[in-house]
Image: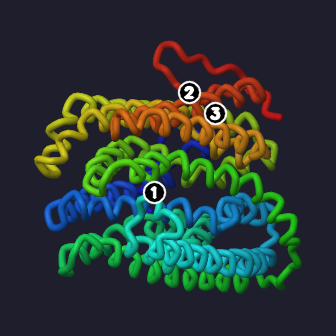
Amino acid sequence: MKLKKLLRKLPVKKGQRELVGGGAVAFAYRILGFLFTYGLMLAIARRFGPEGNGYYNLFTAWMAVLGVLATLGLSSSNVRSVAEYSAKGEWGRLRPLHNGVLRAVIPFAVLLGLGFLAWRQLARMGVVGDGGIPSPVMLAMALVVPFSAALLVNVEFIRGMKRVAVSELLRSPAVLGLTFLAVLAIPGGPMAPVAANAVITGCCALLGLYLVRRYLGGIEARHQTEPLPINMREHLMLALPMIVTALASSLNGRLDTIMLAWYRPSDVIGIYGTAVKISIGIEFVIGAIKTIAMPKIAEMYHSGRHKELRETLDYAAKLVFWTTAPVTLVLLVFARPIMGFVGPEFAEGALVLRIMTLAHFISASSGMVGAFLNMTGSQVAFSRIVVTAVAVNIGLNLLLIPPYGMTGAAVAAGTTLSLWNIAGAIFIYRKHGINMYYIPWLTKHRPAHVD
């Protein structure tokens, strides 16, 4: 309550005030998740060494891709659809939407898990290669993918209902924090962190399902609504370009780790993954703002409040720049001591940290490119941009990893991340007249003509 009263006194407009207020809550949870990430890295490095870190990084990289694929894009479209139904007062469509999404996602996720089990068995028989994935890690992925998909669906549904604090708690701090505590307590070999994360992901998925059902019950009682029919085919068609975009974006962020495993052992993956995770700290600010902004963008765009939309995006761009620039400078200057603090053998990843820090700063400075395109009906154009980026990413990784190892992977990943964000910003500027970037003393925002 005190935060809300304070925000009302700020010299900003309602959309900007909601961005700061909601973003502050999300940012607080992201900071908590960031601290748990650092703690988890240190705990795994100290207890299980680079090999344990490598197993864990490879597992989480693959699960990020498989979880997104298993949702069929419906987790991303949930945010837009829930916000749209809420804006129109069509509360009775929310429960049928959630039921329909789960009925589509869970069976597909189970099939994906069975496919991974078959791949594991064929790899153990020597029929096919294992893709650099240790057999126990592959088994864990196969078992967890349905729970990971369910967790993504429930988190995005909760976010669409503007329960930002709860969605952000489930998205990161809950899983990371509990995994961190488990890693500190449990014995075992390098697979122990993977096993802990797998079990906790399943528990959080079930908790997310319970919370969604509870919130839906409250909404239905408050508005005295009856279930309204929905067309799941229409939702699947809406989600199709979003799954392409989400999967391509997820691949762009993990291809380096996945492909590096083809050429280098698990300890190198551990060092590389640690540097990448530290650099991602720059994106925490834009991630927190994006969490509250996505439903707001959809709401303002579909209700015709285009001037307010432009002003909110301008404000967000400035906020992101001034909060990420100092972090970027610290990571660039102190890359070696930061990596060395994790462990002496991790110091060789300092160059990777510098490369990825610059790339994530460019990405964060581009503002909410993906969120804007997905929430305003340009998801097809965005999917083409990120799919092209995946092709470029694969080519660069194949070209650079064999001779240069993790430095080559960092150059490939950093180049691709920067290029697709710049391409998306250019598309938005040409179509809508909105400049997503903010560069002090240089950037000028012209009046938008949002189509």
Q: Amino acid at mark 3?
A: Glu
Query: Where the C terminus falls, by quadrant?
Result: top right
Category of crowding for the residue at label 2, using alpha-carbon neighbours closer than 10 angstroms: few (below 14), some (14–19), many (at least 20): many
Residue occupying image coordinates x 59% and y 80%: 114
Name the residue tied to disc 3. 311
391 shown above or below 418: below
Front label number (1 vs 2)? 2
Of callouts 3 and 1, which one flags the residue occurring earlier in the amino acid sequence?
1
Residue 22 locus on image (x, y percent): 51, 55
Q: Horizontally, is 320 left or right of 16 in the view? A: left
Quarter in which the N terminus is drawn: bottom left
Q: Is residue 246 left or right of residue 65?
A: right
Numbered badge on residue 437? 2
Q: Earlier in the sequence, mark 3 or mark 2?
A: 3
Give the CA separation, mark 1 to mark 2. 22 Å
The three-letter code of the residue at mark 2 reads: Tyr
Q: Which residue is mark 1?
A: 26
> From this viewpoint, is residue 312 visible?
no
> Which structural element holds mark 3?
helix
Residue 25 visible at all: yes
Q: Nearer the viewer, residue 420 or 37?
A: 420
Callout 3 touching callout 1 (CB < 8 Å): no
The amino acid type of the residue labelled 1 equals: Ala
Please state the horizontal and vertical placement of residue 87, each as a whole percent of the image. Answer: 76, 61
Q: Position of residue 274 (x, y in %)?
A: 29, 50
User: Upstream in the sequence, badge 1 or badge 2?
Assistant: 1
> Where on the picture, by quarter, is residue 209?
bottom right
Residue at the image position 75 percent from the left and 46 percent from the top:
379
Q: Residue at x 24, y 36 (%)?
A: 350
Which residue is at a point 40% across and 73% down the rendered structure image?
A: 135
Whether residue 60 is situated above or below residue 387 in the rendered picture? below
